[in-house]
Structures are given as C-alpha cells and as structure tokens.
Amino acid sequence: APVTGELRCQCLQTASERLGPRRLAHVELIAEGPHCPVPEVIATLKDGRKLCLNPAAPWVQLIINKILRGPATL
Amino acid sequence: APVTGELRCQCLQTASERLGPRRLAHVELIAEGPHCPVPEVIATLKDGRKLCLNPAAPWVQLIINKILRGPATL
C-alpha cells in the first residue's frame, strides 16, 4: 500500500548513526496529519535498505538540503 | 514499480505555481544518479495529485524544511 494511505505513523524509531548524503538514493517526507502527529522521514539507501530518520535532527535537514542542491555540493 | 527502480528521470516539467506546505501530504526526494543527472522532487498533494517541484527553487526548499520542522511552523 502507498505510504500516504497508511493510517498510522510509519517510524517506530529513527536511525541513531549519521549517514552521508552519497549513501541515500531516495528520501520520503511525510507531513504530519490525522495518521500521525509528527512529520516522518524515510530514507532508502543505495543498497536498498530503508531507515527512518529524525526530521528534527540538524544533520537530517542538512543532507536533505544537499540532495536538493544536487551533485555539486555532495 | 517503485520510483527507485526506474531508469530515467521522472519529471518532464516542474510546477510553475507555488504551493503552501499545508497542501502537501508527502514529498519524495530522489537523488541524482545513473538514472538521472539532476535531483528530483515529487510532491503528493492532500487531494492525491502528484506534481514535480523544482529542487533548486528557494520556495521548494522552504516548504520541505517546513514539513521537516512539523506543524508548529506551518
């Protein structure tokens, strides 16, 4: 089922170690809403693993902004 | 098929109008890679529509950061 159709929070815990932006293939941001009171960030690594990240962590905000700015800044 | 399995860029064009963060349910960030030379941002609105956003646009970076910070800042 698509994540947007789920009726509860997706992340039970978030990654404790920092990841470099080069390891991430794909990041989903899910806004808070009736299904979950907090925003959630689900990262897919280049090796296919999925991890929840803490949206409030400064390093998470930093790598998301690096992905947005593209390869020149990685 | 999952977006991460696609072998080409997903976005042919990006939205020309600005969206408020309250309209977004879900945002996918896809890092650049062998499938596509630029990062891509695919937003899903609360009404279910999907739109590509320009990752280099300051307003796009702003709403992504607002989603990360949660409801207190919307």
Image (cartoon, coloured by chain):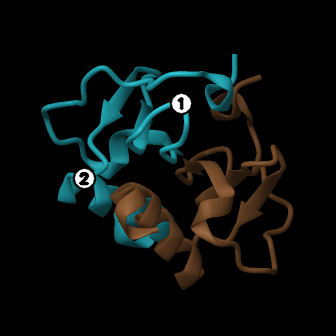
Chain colours: A cyan, B brown
User: Label 1: chain?
Assistant: A
Q: Nearer the viewer, mark 2 or mark 1?
A: 1
> Could you tell me the amino acid type at mark 2?
Ala
Name the residue tied to disc 2: A56
User: Label 2: chain?
Assistant: A
Quadrant for the C terminus of chain A in the image: bottom left
Quarter of the image for residue B32 reads: bottom right
Residue drawn at x 52%, y 51% as measured from the top left:
B31
Residue drawn at x 38%, y 42% as measured from the top left:
A38
> Could you tell me the amino acid type at mark 1?
His
**Horizontal and vertical percent position of residue B41:** 63, 57
Residue drawn at x 79%, y 69% as measured from the top left:
B14
The residue closer to the viewer here, A32 or A58, is A32
Quarter of the image for residue B52 reads: bottom right
Q: For mark 1, does the 10 Å Cα neighbourhood hold few (<14), some (14 to 19), or many (20 or more) residues? A: some
**Horizontal and vertical percent position of residue A44:** 45, 31
Label at residue A35: 1
Q: Earlier in the sequence, mark 2 or mark 1?
A: 1
Dot 2 and dot 1 residues touching (CB under 8 Å): no
Query: In the displayed image of the protein, which residue is found farthest to the top?
Result: A1
**Horizontal and vertical percent position of residue B39:** 58, 59
Residue drawn at x 58%, y 73% as measured from the top left:
B60
Quadrant for the N terminus of chain A in the image: top right
Query: In the displayed image of the protein, which residue is found farthest to the left?
Result: A17
Instruction: Give the side of residue A53 with respect to residue A6, left or right.
Output: left
Q: CA distance from mark 2 to mark 1?
A: 19 Å
